[in-house]
Structures are given as C-alpha cells and as structure tokens.
Image: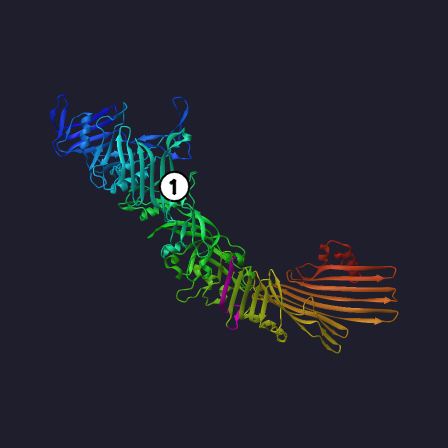
Amino acid sequence: MVAVPNFLLVRSADHLLLGVSWSGLTLTETRPDGMPVLKAATDDALLLLTFPPQHVAEETSRRDEAPPQILPSGSGAPVPVWHAALSGPSRIAFNLPRGTTLVPTVDGVLQALSRGRPIPPTSPPRATDTALELPWRMTFSFEDRLGDHDVMSVHPVLPVTLAGVSGLWRARLAATRPEPGTPVRDAALALRAIDEDTANVADPVFSDPLGGPIPLGRAERTRLAAEASVRPARATRLELSALGGTLSATGLWENFQWEHEAVLGRDVRVRTVTSGVLYPLGHRAKYVELSERIFDQTAGNAAVLRSQFVLTVTEPVRRPPPEGAAARAFPFGDVEITTLAYPNLKSADWQDFKNPATGQVHSDVFFQPTTANDGPVAFPVRCAAPLRDVRFDLPLLFVADVARPGFSSLTDPDFEKELAKVYKQRSVQLPGIPIDLVRANVRRDGDVHEVHGITIEGSLHSTGYRPRLKALEVRLPALRTLLGSDSPKEVHFTAEYLSQGATQDVLLKMASALDISFVGRTARSGGLVAPHLETDAISRTLGPIDTGALPAPGTGLIDPGQLFPPDATLLGFALKDLVTDLKAPPAITSTLQPGQPPAAKMAWTGVKLKRNGPFQPTGQSTLDMTVTVSAAGADTVCKVRDFALVLPSPSKPLLQLQFASLTFTHRSGGPPRIQVDGVGVKFLGELQLLEQLGDAVDLGDLEPYIDVTPAGLVAHYSLPLPSVTAGAFVMRDLAVNTEITIPFDGRPVSVSFGFASRENPFRLAVLMFGGGGYLELEIDHTGLRRLEAALEFGAMLAVDFIVARGEVHAFGGVRFELAGSAVTLTGYLRIGGCVEVLGLVSVSVELCISLAYQSATKALVGRATLVIEIDLTLWSDSVELDSGTWVLAGGGSRRNHDIFAARDADEGLERWRAYQAAFVPLPTGDR
C-alpha cells in the first residue's frame, strides 16, 4: 500500500487547482508511458481533495450608509472600498470502491473521483475528514436527504471548450438517488454542521472604524451550527471551484431560519431569521438580517452587499397570566405592542451570557434593538385596563430562543437575573391616568389611583418573561382636594398583597412617609377636629394609613397614641386622649373616573369619645366627620354629641358648658355654619356667686349668631333683659352675652360670658344718683384667661336762679381686669361744675383724678387733669393742667419729686406745679 500526500493538481486550461492525497491504494502496474497505475485493494481506500478558499466574507452596510472607506484607484480616481476576509480551504474525503484504479494525473484523479463516495466525517472533523468551509467559518459535511452518503461528484474530466474558450472547472455535488419528487436541477443534498467551535470564532475586525458586519455573523453562525448539527439544512446547489464555491441552501428550524445564495464564493443573498421574545414583556418576535448584492449608484454602480436589519413582532397581544402574584404585579389585561415592524435598525450588538454557576459562556443570546441614529427602539405599548387603556413607549431587549444542553434562554433563572441587571428598571411617565390596581370583582375606592409614572422590570414566570411594576408614582387627589397639595409619591405593592391578593387591605407601601395634617386647617376637616396622620401605606378601604398603628390582632382595636401625634386635636384637646375603642383611622379616599374630576372623601364616623381632662362625656359621646368634594360641589359635616366642657379642669372647676351636640356644616355655595344644640351653662367653684345669674340664663332655645373668620368660628349668644322701673329706680340696657370660640388653628375652645359689656354697660338711676357697669369673663381648659368687671356711680345737681343757673356733678368708678397673670385695677373720680350769668358769662371747672394698679411694676400710679373754661361773650379761653403720671405707692423707693425730676419740663407740668404749690408748698429741696 502506497500513500502519496499533498499532490497539487493544476490545469490552466479550465483553471483547475486541487490538492490531492490518497491512502489505501496499491501499485499494480506501470503504463507504457511510464505512469504508475494504483488500485484500491481494500474497502477503505481514501481519496482526499483539498480546494482553495471557497468563500469571501465581505463587509456589508445598510442601504442608507456611505461606503465604509474611499481609496484612490490606479488611475488616481477615488473608489469606494468594502473589506473582506477569505475562508480557509475545504476538503472532500471520498471512499474509492475496491478495484478502483487511479493514474496519478489530472485526468486519472478526476476519473477515480467520479467513482468515489463521500466518507461520513466526525465532529469536529479530523484532518482527513470532509470539511467544507462555505460560507466563512461554517464547516459542513454533505449527505443526501435520505440520510445516506450516497453522493457523487459531477465534474468534467477534460476541459469543456466551446468556440475555443474553455469553461471554469467545477465539481457539482449531488445525491446519487434523490428523494422522490425532487426537481432535476436540485442537488438534493443535506448540509450537516460538524464544527461548532469554528462557527463561534469572532467576526473579522476590519481596520476602518466604520467597518460593518458580514452577512452571516457569529451569532447567526452559532445558531446555524447548533441547528444544522441535529437536523441538516437543505442544499439545492453545491459546486466547488478554484475561484470559490456556489451554494443555494435553506435551513428552516423552529427558532431559526437560514437562506444563502453564493456564486463563486461571493454572497448574492443571505437571509437569517432568529426567533425570540422581547424582555420584559415576553412578546414573541423575529429578528431578520437580509444582505443582498445590488448595483449601487453611490458606489459607482459596483455590485456591493447592502443589508437591512428588521425586527418583527409576531405576537402583537399577550394575554395576562393566570391569577397570581405575576398578574397582580402588573395589573393590566392584554398587553399589546401596537407597531409590529421595525425596519432600518442597526445590526444587532449581540451580548454573551456567562453562567455564574457553571462558568459556561453562551454567546450571542440577547441584544438591545437600536435605531439607525444609535437610540434604543421605543416600542409603543398598550395595556388594557378596566377604566382606560394605558399607553406608553418602552425600550425592550430581544432575547434569542436558544436551547442547548443545560441551558434554555427562555427558562434559565440565572440568565433572567442577568437580563434584569442589564435592563435594570425603566421608568415611564404617564399623564395622570386613573388605573385600577386591583381589578377585583367588587371595586373599592382605594383600588383606583391617579398614576403619573410606572417603573417596569422583568421576571421569569411559568408562562415566560412577564413585566412587573417595581414602583409607581401616584398622586392622591383626595389630599389635593382636601389640603390643596399632593406631591407625587413613590409607592410599591406590598408583599402581602402580591402573595395573597384582594384579601389583603393594605395595597401599597410608600417609599417615604407622608405627613397628612389638618392642624391649623380645621376648616377643611370639619372645623371641630384637626386630624394629623403620619402615613406610610395606602389601604384599599381607608386610603393613606400608618402601618405602625393598625388594629391589634387580638382585639381589633387601634392604639390612638400610636396613630395620632400630640398636635392632632378635637375642640383643641389632643385626639389621642379622647378617642377610645378605635377600630379604624380616618378614611381618605378618591373616586376616579376617566373624563371626570376626581371626587374626594374623608370619613370618620361612630368614633367613641372618652372622659379626659375638661372634656366630659354626658352619655354615649361620639364623633362623626364626613367631607366630600366632587364636581357637584363640596359637603362637610362634623358633629360631636353628648359632652360637656368643665373649665378649666375637673379638679378646679369654674364653668361647665354642656352640649347635646355641636355640628359644623359647610355646603357649596354657602358660608360655613355651626349649630349648637342643648347648651347649658353652670358656674362652679369660685364663680358660684354668678350661679343665680347663670340659672336665669337659658341658652338652649337661643339661636346663635355665627361669625366665620379665617381664624375660626364664633357662636354669639345674646339675651337682652327688659328694663326694670320702680318709682325713682330705673335699670336698663341689661343683656347677657355668651361666646363660644372654635379656632381653626388647633387652639382650644374657649367660652366668654358677659353681663352687659364694656361697649354697652348696663345703666342704673335712683333720683339724682346714677351709674352702671359690666362683667365679662373668658375661660378655657388652661384656666381663667380673662376676667373684667367695672362699676360706675355718681350724682348730678342742677340749680336755676333765673339770672344765673348752673350744675355740679361728681362721678366715680372702678374697673378690674385679670388677663392671664396680669392684673389691672383702675379707679377714677370726676368732679366739676359750671355757672352761667345772664347768658353773658360762663365758667366751667372739671377735675379728673385717676388711680391705677400696675401688676407688672407692682405700683399704684395716679394722674390728675384740671380743665377751666371762661367765656365772656367777646373773649374766651381755656386752661388745661395735666399732672402726668406719678407713683403713689409701690414701684420701688421712688418718690413723687423723683418722678418730677426725671421728667422733661413742659408748659403743662409747670402750670400744674404752680397750681399745686398754691395749696401744698413743696419742700425747698424738691422745687
């Protein structure tokens, strides 16, 4: 047996160029021309042909792109240039039947080749196995479509010449026994991929930075190698020559398609279709790469490869998953991608995945679809929702459907984690759309929220990739309506709701706490009550809530001390100290309907109140508050029933004010109103001296006058009493005044009670003697805030002697005022008279002396004023003498003359000193 390797067959007439070697042949004879004759003496004789490179991997570019490079030609004119890379050589190993003879000449080798049959290769192929590299870095063996290696090479032994011109030599491979129904021109071959490692090598890197891809890139080659190694592709034409191979092949698999037309090693048309899904929505799609050779005017009408990259959504609508956590995490119905075709993309920048558990690298598994201007593709998405479809644009990842031993791109949890890291989270802004986040059969007010943004991430579900809402940006229209502001809040679905569904009432958890305070704005919460809630979650039934103050599991009751901070008040008293047996906090909810203004509601009804400090229930004391605001108007009602205020405290009672009910109402189009029913007043303790006066006053049947100001509400009660006349005794201008003040700024309720008033004192006269006065007091839970009383008395006597007449009078009074810790005691004496003679001369004298006690300085100070007026018909004048203020007692050791010495001299003071000196001479040292 003789083995002759590495012969080179060259025939210039028809450009035949082959490397040849053989084994298993025995020299049997020598021809007369001296050429040896070899013979296959066994069944394993091998004839191995080696062809030069059969394919050129050419650079391709999109139709709208300029040539990647411009270089000068031999004539100096610039020409467009595309780069290319040659494939490696191709081999065909043929088995020669026993007895086949071979003469080591071109003709003899070609004759023996006609009798040979290809040998099934191993994978990866050995150096003596058939291995066709066509296209670039794709290694195939060939067989017939019936699964046998009954394939022949159809080739001319001698040059084919026509009109003196020899044609290019080529070996056309075809099935010896094509399957029935195969067209005559169909080679009926099957191409089996035998070297996945070679297919996985990197694409050629051309020197120019604008260099484009090749028609069959690494991602497509690896998929083709994986698919065609199991189920071969079909080839209708396969020819090999010294100038390159000619191939017409098609491979149709479930998740990948390949079509390839090449002539003499140059691609004419290459089309690949990769099936996959769009992460995180999970819609199925196909990525198509199409490269075609065209005569391009921009390239001087050269035949160049131009490519188009298209993504097509093949599953426009994705149904929601079955009821469960995945469905609740993305609370929509059908999810539709409304635009199906995305042409003119950039070529895919495929990304690899390295499995952290096994260390295995899976190449070219996913990529980000990118537009020609390098921006990510924004897929228009429509999500069906009960109230209104939600539409937005969202970038997505294309994930190829890759199934290999130990790895499936669409079900591998480690790969899904990698996708989540790459995709991260995508935020989408929405125009304040009402969305039902629960989609329960029975909708609650807290199920629908005004959503201004959503953050989407992906997850792996039994039905494939599914989106979920990592976060939502919501506004609370109830707060906007009730408080006038509602900043956007980031919220998340609670883990309990996602796992258990609508049986859980707490729907959303806030990323940061929300402070809801009506302190200082009780006009918005019912006038009487100022709730203050520090919330961190949103309930389906109650709206914003504090999860730290939920009902206790054993009792179902809420600890008011945990729910309300100290500044939350009812009638100025801390809510946490008044509320008892509390089962729910105030519910603040919105009703959202598309195309309509949101309706807001705050309700807190049947709240039981307990005894605490000045607040004393007289029965089943309860609080009811309901505030509703909608397009139809606003309606606010707040009522407190069956209570009394013992002021300042039950341990030191001075006044008890009892109410059957206190009701604040405010309806659209009208002013706020307060209705007080069943009012009773009782003086206690040190004010029992007013008890009989209080018994005479029945406020229960009086209709109060309500004065509404931005600061609060004041209920005025005024009970005028009739004048009393008995002979020379007259008492008139009697009235009992009561004011109940309810501030809107959280200050406590206060009560003012007055017998007459400073502005309208009562009047009393007995003959020539007369007087009057008033009594006023104000009290709240801190104590007696103000007590003021005044009494006036005096007499007036007139005489008339015909030629002369006159009058003399004397009046005095005292006023006491207690305001907090400051005490003011004031008294005055006014003496005067006048005389008139014949209407020609009149003289009047008025002396007013006032005394006041100042608690701040603990001093009793006085002041005197003397006014004398003279009228002589043709001449008149008046003199006023004012002593200024001097200290009579207290205020330290200062004496009168010290006061005078400290004061600046003025004319009035000097005149008063002169008047005073006429009666009481001052010591010499004091002048």
Res 321 seen here: yes
Q: Position of residue 151 (x, y in %)?
A: 21, 36
Instruction: Depth check: give the residue in front, 71 or 326.
Output: 71
Point 53% across, 55% down: residue: 485
State which quadrant residue 851 falls in: bottom right
Residue 24 vertical placement versus 718 (above, below): above
Q: Position of residue 162 (x, y in %)?
A: 27, 25
Residue 490 located left or right of residue 245: right
Residue 725 vertical placement versus 847 (above, below): below
Any magenta on residue 549? Answer: no
Q: Which residues are magenta?
A: 596-619
Q: Position of residue 354 (x, y in %)?
A: 31, 42
Amino acid type, mark 1:
Val
Instruction: Depth check: give the residue in front, 861 or 652.
Output: 652
Residue 300 located left or right of residue 102: right
State which quadrant residue 739 falls in: bottom right
Instruction: Depth check: give the residue in front, 418 or 24.
Output: 24
Any magenta on residue 614? Answer: yes
Per the image, label 1 sits on a secondary structure element best described as strand
Quarter holding the C terminus is bottom right
Quarter holding the N terminus is top left
**Number of marks in the image?**
1
In the picture of the structure, the residue carrying the numbered disc 1 is 310
Res 746 seen here: no
The 10 Å Cα crowd at callout 1, few under 14, some 14 to 19, many 20 or more, is many
Colour mode of the rendering: rainbow
Instruction: Depth check: give the residue in front, 39 or 706.
Output: 39
Residue located farthest toward the front when viewing the structure as drawn: 163
Q: Position of residue 179 (x, y in %)?
A: 23, 41
